[in-house]
Image (spheres, rainbow, N blue to C red):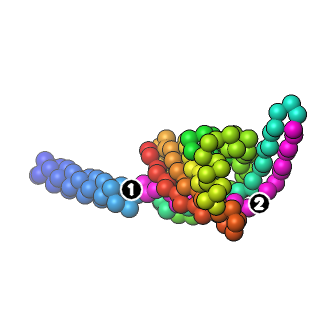
Amino acid sequence: MATRSVKICLSVSLLFLIIVTIVIVTLFLTLFKPKDPNITVHPLGLENLQFSLLPNLTLNVSLGMLITIGNPNYGSFEYKNSTGYIKFHDTVVAQVPMEAELVPARSTINVNTSADFMVGKMINDPNFWTDVLTGTLNMTSTSTLPGEARMLKIIKFKATAYSSCDISFNITSKHVDTKCISKFKL
């Protein structure tokens, strides 16, 4: 009699364990599956302008930026200090420092930073004057945000968010249009 009740108990426990495992795997493959972040870049305006003629012509401009990071995931993401880069026809013309932040689950944060443009590098690029004559300066920005994703404040994964943005600056209207593509990798 005792062995029969032990067999029933073990069978029910095994069945329960299988059902819980199936539910957890299903949740991780559907609801908790990592989704790409939504990142947008909004230029705010000039913050600093440095100009000198001697010994060489230099012109450096700091442009204030507001970066909006949306996290559609059920886990939070905390990234470390990093630097983004803005390129003008394959030449790095600006650096964008990004201070460490926590992006809570299913929320959006705004990060204030500034892009330090090396205008001399842009002017020396052979494509600069062609773009000026067409009225639009086209640039790309890239950033890599290494960090840690947390599920339910218990499970931690190393994760990285990648972002690439196409930036078009209309010289006459001073309108800036950005289109970003973001990826999230565990």
**Could you tell me what secondary structure mostly forms the magenta stretch?**
strand
Three-letter code for the amino acid on which mark 1 is drawn: Lys
Determine the CA span between mark 1 and mark 2: 38 Å
Element assignment for label 2: strand
**Does the image show residue 89?**
yes
* Viewer-side residue, 154 vs 33: 33
* Viewer-side residue, 157 vs 145: 145
**At 85% across and 44% down in the image, what residue appears?**
51
> Would residue 75 be found to the left or right of residue 47 on screen?
left
Occupied quadrant, residue 28:
bottom left
Whether residue 44 is in magenta: the answer is yes
* Viewer-side residue, 24 vs 162: 162
Q: Magenta span covers which residues?
A: 34-53
Percent coordinates x, y for residue 11 in the rendering: 17, 53
Tell me the crowding category of disc 2: few under 14, some 14 to 19, or many 20 or more residues within 10 angstroms, Cα based. few
Three-letter code for the amino acid on which mark 2 is drawn: Gly
Percent coordinates x, y for residue 65 in the rendering: 71, 56
For the C terminus, the quadrant is top left
Whether residue 136 is in magenta: the answer is no
When the figure is inspected, residue 118 is found, relative to residue 130, above or below; the finding is above
Tell me the crowding category of disc 1: few under 14, some 14 to 19, or many 20 or more residues within 10 angstroms, Cα based. few
Disc number for residue 45: 2
Disc number for residue 97: none
- Residue placed under numbered mark 1 in the picture: 33
**At 74% across and 41% down in the image, what residue appears?**
120
Percent coordinates x, y for residue 144 in the rendering: 55, 43
**At 71% across and 49% down in the image, what residue appears?**
115
> Would residue 42 be found to the left or right of residue 22 on screen?
right
Element assignment for label 1: loop
